[in-house]
Amino acid sequence: MIVAKGVGKSFGGERILSGVDLTFHEGEVVGIVGPGGVGKSLLMKILCGLVEPDEGEVTVFGRSWADLSVTERAKLRERFGMLFQNYALFDFMTVGENVAFPLVQRGDMSAQDVQERVVERLTQVELSGVNHLYSRELSGGMKKRVALARATIGEAPIIIYDDPTAGLDPVTSSKIFNLISDLQRPDSLSLITSHDIERMMPVCQRYIMLYQGGVYFRGTAQEAKQSQDPVLRVFFGGDAVDVGRRTMAGAEGIS
Amino acid sequence: MSGNYERMELKVGALVLVCSLLLIAFLVLLGKFRPGQEAMVVVDFETSGGLRIGAPVKLAGIDAGRVELVDFMGGAADEDTQRRVYVRVTVSMKPELRASLREDARFYITTEGLLGEQYVEIDPGRADEVLSNKPVEGISPMRLEILTANMNRIATLAARMLEDNEEDIRDTIRDLRSTAASAKSALDDAKALLTDVRQAVARLETKAGTLMDTAVRTLNEYTPGKGETGDNIKKTTASAANLVTSAERVFADGKLVKDVISDARSALRKAGGLADHIGVEVTKVRKKADATLGSVDVVIAEAKVPAISALQKLDALMSSGKAIGGDIKALLESIRKGEGTVGAVLADRELFDDVRELMKDIRRHPWKVLWKE
Amino acid sequence: MTQMLTVMGARIIEILQLIGGIALFFLRTLRALVPPKYDARETWRAFYKVGVQSYTIVILTAMFTGAIMVIQAGGTIQASRATSFVGWAAGFTVLSEIGPVLIGLMFSGRVGANNTAELGTMVVTEQVDALRTLAIDPMNYLAVPRFIAMIVMLFLLVALGDLFALLGGAITSHVMLDISYSVFVSQVIDAQLLDEYILGLIKGSLFGMSIAIVSCYFGFTVRGGAPGVGRAVNNSVVASAIGILAIDLLVGIIHHAVR
């Protein structure tokens, strides 16, 4: 479904990613982990074509981003649903409009169908009755859930959840992961970035760990825990080693 | 939410509408924005007389357009018209009014009221050809202050002249009148006298003729008498007595002749005196006329020559007197008719006074020349 | 010495990069105008934000401007007894020069800054990325409506401001110079200021265009979270002001040359 070959990216002379080779298939739920600032979010944006890599190429459904025209890229992006780290809810729209937006934008449904679907999806994320509110009137957890609803309402084949639990309390985090699990369809690919490996566990089938600008590990949680590698052991096996760093990375909004 | 959205649309719409209306209002108020095409006419003037952009343009007194531009060209030569241009005024007019202008249309810069706004007045003209698009030469405005100054000077001069020579002028008129009258009576006298003289001469001739006949016959009868001396002497004595009687009668008639002659002489003397009188009068007239009216001089000179020759011959007197009378009459006539301004002024006392009043008035309020209250 | 030169050179390169970036952004905006594919709703919203939320400040600025012009000219006018020039002087300066420039500066301070902040926040909170994932080009969706709205609204707001500037001038002349309102109005009308009025309106649209481009550019190029937004807003207002004055100068030169 998605193939990345030799992807590298620098920002301001600092090399963040280099030589990343990845392959994702449909029906998978993959966790992308790694310390804050390692480039998880950047990798996600490269995968969905929002950021062009300096080197290497990304192929989605057999088509490389680099070969596509602007309109073709826009077309291809419609096959992605994305939940952004910073919610990215349109603050000039109400919750209902935000959730409906992907469907309205696609323009293949009647307004009534859209409305029904929105209500349904908001009920699924336990947010019924907030349609008319603006995102600034919501709490962080509610915003995440609205973003979740918006990311999934289009039922895109590929859904990227970029740090869906950043800055949330553990209870809410669990709730979010449960929702992701609930909303997962068998034929779609989901990529989830997070530090919260413990709560990711029930959701993700396999993990990719980014460390020091490259792919450090790929495999299941079991494999990681059994590994002798100290970094992996700390990251997967240990307790929340770097809560402070995680929070910082979340607040800064860039990784 | 959709209510919110509609309210937003409403507010935006209202703002746009208000601003657009303001925009249109400003465009219309501020200027040249008028629907329809305007025809332009370029007019050159010597001076703008203070004409401003936007001043009205009137065609025969009716609003027809406005002044678009007033440019000072500084005497630049115009190639089209071969004129030096000082002030070039561009005037916009409604096209249908522009079309009514003829080639001899005249453009004036004038004033509305005395100190009112300057505007361009157009006399559309009467020529057949329509006014071309070349720059037209306009009639430059009379500068009000200069005009007033000139009028004031002329009025002062005229008034002073009338005042200074008032007596002379009045005398002249009186003399001219009396001269004319005496010349006429002299002519009448001369005519009557001549008739008398002719009758007297005719009578004298007749009497002298009869006297001569009688004398010749008496002489004839006396000479042949011999035989019949006694009778004849008797007869002769009788004849002589007749002769004496006749001679006495002739003598008596001679006295008559003497009378006739003396009559004629006195007539001649009278005529001479009359001629002198006429001469004096004419000279007087001439003097006076010289003093006041130079132009009268020529007429007087013409009249003088025949008047002098009238002294020598009665017939000459008659014809010459007639000529003088005619000339003077013509002169008076022309004065009466008022040929020339001064003549008109002098012809009538009332008019004279009127003029003097007017002059005084004008000197006090020069602007009355232009504008009567 | 060398260090100073290096710093200076770096600053100059930075400024040139900025100008180049803004120019490129301008071209991209123009490119996005055709085909005319922009969200009607977002355009209305831009009109609302740009126009309805700024007309009060425009009116206030304009009234003060008109008043100040009369006060400034008032002393000279009274001294020379040239009261018949008040309408002309106020009209001329307000309509062609001070009105559009001050309205533009206030507009940039309010609407331009607001716009940079809004777009900057959208960038920082990934709303712009979200739009792109939803197959929406931010140029079409965000930049073009603002571009159009600012050009149109600043044109119209200058028209609105001119009225209030003249109103301010009329009130001041009445109070200060004892010139009746009707006299002031007729002086302004008689002054034949159509050219100046149109010039002012053209300036207004050009200012609107430059404010739109500059504020959008700074908004879209925000880096570094919330503090970055603050910096961008600050830079945007300064750059907009410079842009307004530069355009004013340029238009003035062109107008002079054309006449």
Image: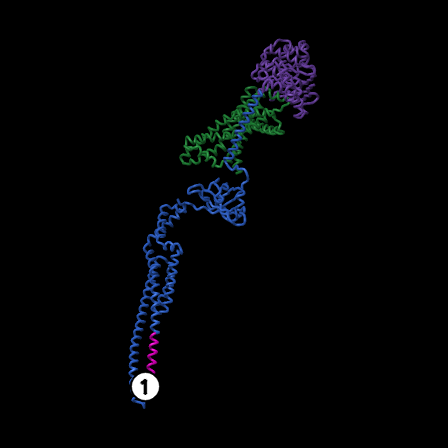
Q: Quadrant of residue A46?
A: top right
Furthest-bottom residue in view?
A: B227
B348 sits left or right of A197 in the view: left
Depicted B254 relative to depicted A133: above or below:
below
Q: Which chain, by letter, is green? A: C
What is the display colour for chain A? purple
Q: Nearer the viewer, residue A180 or B192?
A: B192
> Which residue extends farthest front?
B231
Magenta span has C200? Answer: no
Q: Main secondary structure of the magenta part?
A: helix
Task: Specify the colour of chain B.
Answer: blue
Q: Please report the residue visible at 66 percent of the width from the left and 16 percent of the height from the top.
A: A191
Residue B156 point in image, percent of width and height? 36, 49
> Is residue B96 something that shows in the picture?
yes
Q: Is residue B277 left or right of residue C199?
A: left
Residue wearing tag 1: B222
Q: Which residues are magenta?
A: B203-221
Is B193 drawn above or below residue B112 in the view shown?
below
Out of B12 and C23, give the one closest to the viewer. B12
Label 1: chain? B
